[in-house]
Image (cartoon, rainbow, N blue to C red):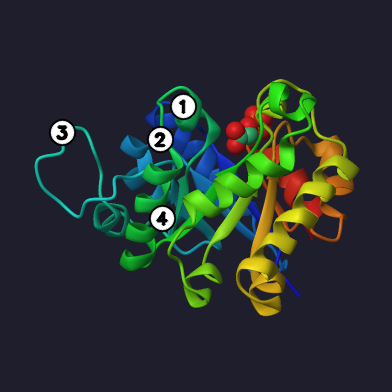
Amino acid sequence: MRRPFIAGNWKMTQDRASAVALASGIAQRVGAGNGVDVAVCPPSCYLDAVGQALTGSAVGLGAQNMYHEPKGAFTGEISAAMLLDVGCRYVILGHSERRHILGETDADVNKKVLAALAAGLVPIVCVGETLDEREAGKTLDVIRTQFTGSLAGLDAGQMKQIVIAYEPVWAIGTGKTATPEQAEEVHFDLRKIMVDCYDEAVGQTVRIQYGGSVKPDNAAALLSQPNIDGALVGGASLDVDSFMEIIAGAA
Ligand code: PGA
């Protein structure tokens, strides 16, 4: 049985006070024994403060990005070791906003995934098609290319440590959610790709989150699909009540 995993992607929102208040509110309400893994991913400048607000709670801390080099003259970048040092357990890699707005390629994401794993972080690796790609019938090709490119060179043991997030680009921040059936179809295929590229054990172990306009009123239907193991939540993770309702939908 794969343990459900709900993560909040706060993107470039919040100030210090609101980030700490949001983290504290979630930390107070997430119990250790509800059978769901929960994490929040604040902007990097608030990781330390949010990590302190989460101390002693069941909520994990994640970053939204990192650089693959361990240290050196890389102005503006943050390493895996720095993320661990401020208490991160997770790092989102290859989010579609980084791919499409900041120009990250599968090869860039691959270097980051390998560096994150080597340092002991759990990468949440995002894949997803654009609307044009879906309408051209290319969804599964795009997913397969992103999967093989972003995860090149991982052995079966490393694969089992990662989390995949399927986030159709057309559903992110738009209010248009993939239907549970549309999402399940891609999750099923992702699992099949993992069985093809690795083995049955990898295919059955790796958790695949869905992301893209997950809200309290659609979370339970998405999360009840057999191959959807959690959610990567943007907008609806910025309010304690709505994030808690989504977590309840996974329990
Ligand atoms: P959204 O964002 O829930 O606001 O659509 C999801 C994401 O980008 O991870």
Few, some or many residues within 10 Å of mark 1 (<14, 14–19, 20+): some
**Disc 1 target residue:** 14
Q: Residue at 90% x, 44% y: name it.
A: 181
Does residue 157 show up? yes
Residue toward you, 68 or 35 = 68
**On the rendered structure, is 119 left or right of 229?**
left
Q: Which mark is residue 138?
A: none
- Residue 133, horizontal then vertical, whole percent: 70, 27
2 and 4 marks in contact (CB < 8 Å): no
Q: Residue at x 69, y 70 (%)?
A: 195
Task: Measure the C-alpha gap from mark 4 to mark 1.
Answer: 27 Å
Where residue 15 appears, as percent x and y from the top left, is 41, 26
Contact (Cβ within 8 Å) of mark 1 with mark 2: yes
Mark 2 surroundings: few (<14), some (14-19) or many (≥20) residues within 10 A: many
Label 2, secondary structure: give it.
loop
- Quarter-of-image position of residue 35: bottom right
Measured as percent of width and height from the top left, residue 87 is found at: 35, 58
Q: Does label 4 or label 1 sit earlier along the sequence? A: 1
Classify mark 1: helix, strand or loop. Answer: loop
Cα separation, mark 1 vs mark 2, equals: 8 Å
The residue mark sitting in front, 3 or 1, is: 3
Question: Of label 3 and label 1, which has the lower sequence position?
Answer: 1
Q: CA distance from mark 2 to mark 3?
A: 17 Å
Residue for badge 2: 43
Q: Do the numbered discs 4 and 1 sit on residues whose CB atoms are within 8 Å?
A: no
Q: Which residue is mark 3?
A: 75
**Residue situated furthest left in the rendering:** 73
164 with respect to 117 (left or right): right
Q: Which residue is mark 4?
A: 113
Q: Residues within 10 Å of mark 3 (few under 14, many from 20)?
A: few
SS class of the residue under badge 4?
helix
- Marks 3/1: CA–CA distance: 24 Å
